[in-house]
Structure formats: structure tokens, C-alpha cells
Image (cartoon, rainbow, N blue to C red):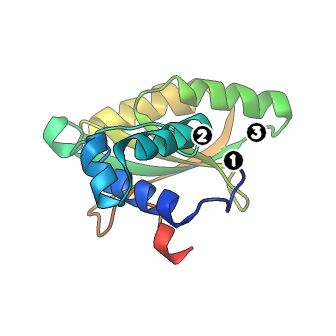
Amino acid sequence: MKTGTLDRIDQCILAELQADAGLQNQTLAERVNLSPSACLKRVQRLRRAGVIREEVAILDAARVGFPVLVISRVSLRSTTREAIGAFERKVHALPQVLQCHCVAGETDFVLVICARSLPDYQAFAQEQLGDALELENYSSDIVLSTTKFTTRLPLDSA
């Protein structure tokens, strides 16, 4: 499935699933005005095509023991393919790293990291980022509050 080949019904299905991935097929079919079998076929096609990557429950980080959110900017000493690959493999294995984005600009990567406390983050940063990786430098911004957080893509404005 190519980008931009989603029809209106596909977009409606995806919008409904973004709001509640746990919808039963019967309910989803009713909401998008399809028969249950046609709806199921479309959802399966969207999964096979990789449009639907995964279905998850989004947890309240503070309520499950991770009230600290940190945005870290990382610059590597070397930006060879091997160095970048090693960094990405290391970061992928760290469960505290929620997101890792390779970026253009003053830094090489932006990480979103969760922690149980500021001392917990400090230990993580020193042990996992500072000592374990070949970093030129890194900086950390502690998130004080979150005004908006969503995983929903604006399908209706595309």
C-alpha cells in the first residue's frame, strides 16, 4: 500500500482505531458504515501493509511509577555508519528510552526518556549515556508539565 492511497473509509477506520484500538470489529464496522466482513478485510489489509504498526494501551507514566520525563539531545563523537548503528542498537535496548529520533541540526539524536526520579535519571544518564557510549556531549531538559500529548495522526486534515 502506497502513501496517500487511503480512501475515506480507510481513514475513518484508522481514526476510530486511533481513538480506541480495542474496538470490536462489529462496533467498528457500524461506526464506518461497513459490513463486519468488509471492515475486517480492510483492517487486515491495513495491518499487512504496515499502516497499522501495532495496537497498544497508553499508560499514565506517573501512575505506574515514572513521573519524570526527560528530553535529551545527544551528539556523537563519530557519525560513521558504524557509530550511528552502535548507538541506535544500544538505545533500542534501553527500556527507559521511549523515543529516539535521528535529527538534523546541532545534535545527532533527540531522546525521550522516562525515570522514577531525578536521581534515577541522573544515574541512568551517567551509566548508560555518559559512560557507556561514545558521546561528544549530551544535554537534558526535564519536562515540568505536558500541555499536549497524543499519538493520533491528523488523518482528516491530510
Q: Nearer the viewer, mark 2 or mark 1?
A: 1
Few, some or many residues within 10 Å of mark 1 (<14, 14–19, 20+): few
Quarter of the figure with the C terminus = bottom right
Residue type for callout 2: Gly
Q: Is residue 145 left or right of residue 137?
A: left
Residue in the picture at 17% in, 35% down: 64
Residues at circles 2 and 1 in contact by the CB criterion of under 8 Å: yes
Q: CA distance from mark 3 to mark 1?
A: 39 Å
Q: Nearer the viewer, mark 3 or mark 1?
A: 1
Tell me where residue 1 appears, x and y as whole percent.
69, 47
Q: Secondary structure at mark 1?
A: loop
Quarter holding residue 145: bottom left
Q: Is residue 55 left or right of residue 10?
A: left
Residue type for callout 1: Met
The one of 158 and 119 positioned closer to us in this rendering: 158
Residue in the picture at 35% in, 60% down: 33
The residue where tag 2 is placed is: 50
